[in-house]
Image (cartoon, helix red, strand yellow):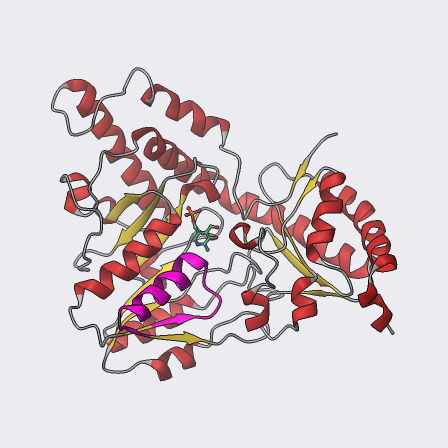
Amino acid sequence: MKRIYLDYAATTPTHPEVLKAMLPYFTEVFGNPSSIYSYGQEAKGAIGEAMVQVAELIGARDEEIIFTSGGTEADNFAIKGMAFAKENKENHVITSSIEHHAVIETCKFLERKGFRVTYLPVDEYGLVDPGDVKKAITNKTILISVMHANNEVGTIEPIAEIGKIAKEAGICLHTDAVQTVGHIPVDVNELGVDLLSISAHKLYGPKGIGALYIRKGTKLVPFMHGGEQERRRRAGTENVPGIVGFGRAAELARQEMSEEAERLAYLRDKLIKGILERIDHTNLNGHPSSRLSNNVNVSVDFVEGESMLLNLDLEGICASTGSACSSSSLEPSYVLLAMGLSHEQAHGSLRLTLGKWTTEEEIEQVLDVLPGIVAKLRAMSPLSENRK
Ligand code: PLP
């Protein structure tokens, strides 16, 4: 059976060009970048090139890029690094209630250490109100962390507006841009951010590599101690093949992003329209226009998201009910609950995220099989008894 992969927000396949760029760094150029002989220096040079490639994708300077093990580490580094750089544990952090676990759990950790954290609400579309950010600022606020786009519902947040507020108040702004970098234009200066997290495996790069953009002059406490790699900000021998792959993925994204975004938005809209028209009692989750071009998230009343996933899987279709991290748990999505959905609606959510290898035929196939799956599940569901 031919598989249809519609979970690109969870991870993307590594681009063949990326793999090709990485391979020599496992074999011929295997040296340690800290070694002074030519093998090492060649590897070091490749890291430098990747820093430029990643920096160019986000309008940063190459020396402002620190490679990490992925988006989770970048988020941890940004938040803990800033919190511990300011000695006073009375300090205050502002974030939103729909952040990825990598941010939410890090903030909860800080709360256990005595920091105060404000989790801002969102509206029915998942948007943070910049006015709420402004109101939450106190003289103890040291960091604002609001994601650039939500991984479950695809809503793009007003970061540039929040950036202006943060700048006026002289407070550091972090954004988790794991779902946006490589997919929509991201410019650290236009957004007005001081810290920005990226993950390579969301933009056709390898897993286990990411980056934190750190604006020049921003002081963070490193949380990996050891050697002097990454200009003493993150110790440990660099993941050279991963970094090279990340750099190549960033370069490809820069070339292909705008055309790809347009193609995906067309397929996304076809899929959304098709689902809402062909299946009754369905609603689109997330913002109708301030939305990632590859994200479809719908609530299908009277069915469980997990049952839809299993039935789609039997048809060879890979989908999700929310973020990959929570797909093994039966808790309803905290993101959808924060947007005001009921537990039942949140339980019946389905996320389909499109990507480079998604075709129109695949979208049509999903639209052909999904109504039948929903009808079958509703026929068996006790929840359907409430149906009008
Ligand atoms: N932040 C967001 C918004 C994400 O979607 C993800 C991954 O799902 C992460 C952070 C974590 O990134 P990584 O898988 O590279 O640790």
Outermost residue toward the left in this view? 36
Q: Depth check: 326 or 138 in front?
A: 326
Outermost residue toward the top in this view? 28
Q: In this view, does 159 lie above or below 165?
A: above
Residue 30 belongs to the span the image colors magenta: no
Q: Quadrant of the N terminus?
A: top right
Residue 107 belongs to the span the image colors magenta: yes
Rendered residue at 39%/49% (across/down): 71
Residue 115 screen position, x and y as percent? 27, 73
Q: In which quarter of the image is residue 364?
A: top right
Residue 130 screen position, x and y as percent? 42, 76
Residue 351 screen position, x and y as percent? 64, 54
The answer to whether one can see residue 134 in this image is: yes
Rendered residue at 33%/76% (across/down): 165
Rendered residue at 83%/65% (across/down): 382
Q: In this view, does 3 lie above or below 65?
A: above
Residue 279 screen position, x and y as percent? 82, 59
Rendered residue at 41%/55% (across/down): 177
Apparent side of residue 309 relative to residue 354 in the rendered image (left or right): right
Q: Quadrant of residue 77?
A: bottom left
Q: In this view, does 327 lie above or below 260?
A: below
Q: In this view, does 196 lie above or below 354?
A: below
Which range is magenta? 94-116
Q: In which quarter of the image is the C terminus?
A: bottom right
The answer to whether one can see residue 194 in this image is: no
